[in-house]
Amino acid sequence: MPYTQHTRSFKSANARPYHSSGRGRQSRPKHGSYIHPSKFINRAVVQTEENAYQATHVFKDFPFSEKLHENIERKGYETLSPIQDQTIPHILAGKDIIGLANTGTGKTAAFLLPILNDLYINRAPGSVLILAPTRELAQQIDEQFREFSNGMKLFSTLVVGGMNIGRQISQLQRRPHVIIGTPGRTMDLIKRKHLSLDAIRVLVLDEADRMLDMGFINDIRSIANQTPKERQTLFFSATITPQIQQLTQEFLKDPETVSVRTADTSEQVEQDIIEAHSKEDKIEKLLDMLTSDEFDKVLLFGETKFGVQRLSDHLEKSGISSVAIHGNKSQSQRQRALKAFKDNRARVLVATDVAARGLDIPNVSHVINFDQPATYEDYVHRIGRTGRAGATGKAFTFVSPSSR
């Protein structure tokens, strides 16, 4: 039964006044196009043994070093995901790759493991550049690199905005093997003559569609053009658009295309709507939901930086442990908030769309859209934070009755 039927008569004993800056009326997003509420409703498809993906390889099949195999085993990796199963052999063979995959499919390990194995043999400094759209995703890739490279004496440097550039320059001077960054900070360091790409042998573009959405196409072109033409390029995207197609033709040579994309929205995510007549009504129903044991680990999306912080503060005052991430937070504040959420010290993470892409937060039980996303694509990426790695998840979106 839709969750709306459980919430209409609720009067929360814990709820405190929530003062909206608006006139108490829920409106459509200020930016972007209207999305019909029917797009927010979908029944989850539970993966069964009959339709589960059957990998053609196991990790032991790959000619990785003994140390890398030990690290894979230590991280608890046993079964390959489809993107890992189908791309790792091609990457090991030196082929360029176009990998089309939804978030949460294990693609970071798909490109990191072959790269690490090659570096362990050749140990070439400054030979790998990995570009990602956001600081959070770049940091997540760096964390996985450090875990997989444990004891291998391979080093990375993270070059992203919002962090001390002087420290990043010092780290680059130590000639790390891998550079992981966002396009803007990477270009900044190149222009300042602190980063040379002459030695790059492998270029990874992760979530290329999102980098284009964020306006990084010129930076990406400039960066790619400063790397040697004889390089391996690994290109990952959730979608294939004409612009993406053009980029792949510019950057890649005779690539292998691997597509493991599922439907536009995760088939493992149960999606439904909640009708609310005002922001106060939304708050009341939200508190009702969050007092239920079912809502174990919740990612809650709002539209504005100010609104997200205010909502998180209100949840805390109402006795629900909550943290927030948004554009007004420093990088260290974001990292602390994400760590608190990952470590279950906060049950709710309230976020703007800065968190909608790429973050791998284990065991998110629910995604709730307190404010509707501006576009359906944003919605897809928001709800992709749950129902990951074959698990099921639930997503709820608040709508006004007049929008139905």
Image (cartoon, rainbow, N blue to C red):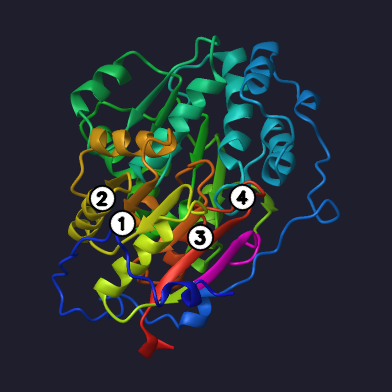
Determine the CA span between mark 3 and mark 4. Answer: 10 Å
Distance Cα–Cα, label 2 vs label 4:
31 Å
Residue 172 figure quarter: top left
Q: CA distance from mark 2 to mark 3?
A: 28 Å
Name which of mark 3 and mark 4 comes first in the sequence. 4
Q: Is residue 354 above or below residue 303?
A: above
| Residue shown at the point (30%, 75%) measured from the top left | 29
Find the magenta span and give its range: 262-272
Q: Residue at x 40, y 18 (%)?
A: 176
Q: Is residue 337 magenta?
A: no
Q: Are marks 1 and 2 in contact (CB under 8 Å)?
A: yes
The amino acid marked with disc number 2 is His
Label 3 environment density (alpha carbons within 10 Å; few <14, some 14–19, many ≥20): some
Marks 1 and 2, how far apart in space? 6 Å
Q: Amino acid at mark 1?
A: Thr
Query: Would you name the residue on which mark 3 appears?
Result: 244
